[in-house]
Image: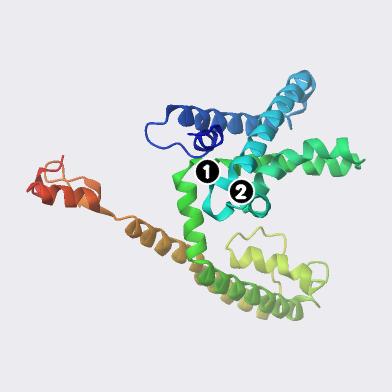
Amino acid sequence: MTFQKRLFEIIETAKKGDEASKIFDISLVCLILANILAVVLSTVDSIQIEYSDFLYRFELVSVILFSIEYILRVWTAILKKKYHSPFTGRIKYITSPMAVIDLLAILPFYLPMLIPIDLRFLRALRLFRLLRLLKMGRYSNAMNIVVSILKRKKPELTITFVIILVLLIVTSSLMYYVENAAQPDKFGSIPETLWWSVCTLTSVGYGDAIPSTPFGKICGGFIALLGIGVFALPAGILASGFEEEMRRHGITKLECPHCHNSVVLKEDSALTLEKEGLPEEDLP
């Protein structure tokens, strides 16, 4: 086995029995979580003032480690079939979603060294450090399942969000023409009224803008009831997606005959029991 191939196995998600890869994965996840904690704590003025040197050094060490990881992933990417070409394959990998996230997670640290940037813009760039949390997607089956569901349900979700967008525009336009004369400060334009529509359709109801005319109140009531059904659509689509994904992975639920609790069983386990002549009642 070549050094490049072994390195590829270590930095990819650990396979069963590969202790080196498992240690690498756990270490990287811990580093990502520590970085997110550091970003959160750095927004506390007292902590930032007292531990600014430590936070900077920690950020420097983290960026170096993440940079090394990024370079190694680009170098070993050609061992994947879809990136097998030495040059175009690496370019294709660099433009992949996870590689872009890896790059954005370290880029804000290097940009000020390369080009002069307005300090206000630099503070905004620091938010990209939070993208390091998305790097954990490589090591989380749950996040991978969510991504898979979003991909499979993309057409349905797209249609739903288009319907919601159209509904927001229609309700905003309606309430603008109904309430503008009575409350020009709250419903001064359709874009301003759009905020009211979002709050009403999502049942948030901040109360900063409310209808005052009788017809406006009637319209607002119907729009609020309409929002309950419309915004439930994405939840239903995602719920059905989770169910389909569980079935696709061959996961079913059985009831334990002894304790009557639900037991999750994969289909291959049921087949093994059948081959060995064991009834399902013998399940623990």
> Measured along the vertical axis of the image, is residue 270 above or below residue 51?
below
| The C terminus sits in image quarter | top left
Which residue is the site of mark 2?
A: 98
Q: Residue at x 87, y 35 (%)?
A: 113
Q: Residues within 10 Å of mark 1 (few under 14, many from 20)?
A: some
> Measured along the vertical axis of the image, is residue 235 above or below residue 256?
below
Secondary structure beneath label 1: helix
Q: Quadrant of residue 160?
A: bottom right
Q: 242 or 59: nearer the eye?
A: 59
Q: Quadrant of residue 183?
A: bottom right
Sequence-wise, the earlier of marks 1 and 2 is: 2
Which residue is the site of mark 1?
A: 138
> Measured along the vertical axis of the image, is residue 20 above or below residue 184?
above
Secondary structure beneath label 2: helix
> Measured along the vertical axis of the image, is residue 18 above or below residue 173?
above
Q: 110 or 39: nearer the eye?
A: 110
The kind of residue on which mark 1 rests is Arg
Residue contact at pointers 1 and 2, CB within 8 angstroms? yes
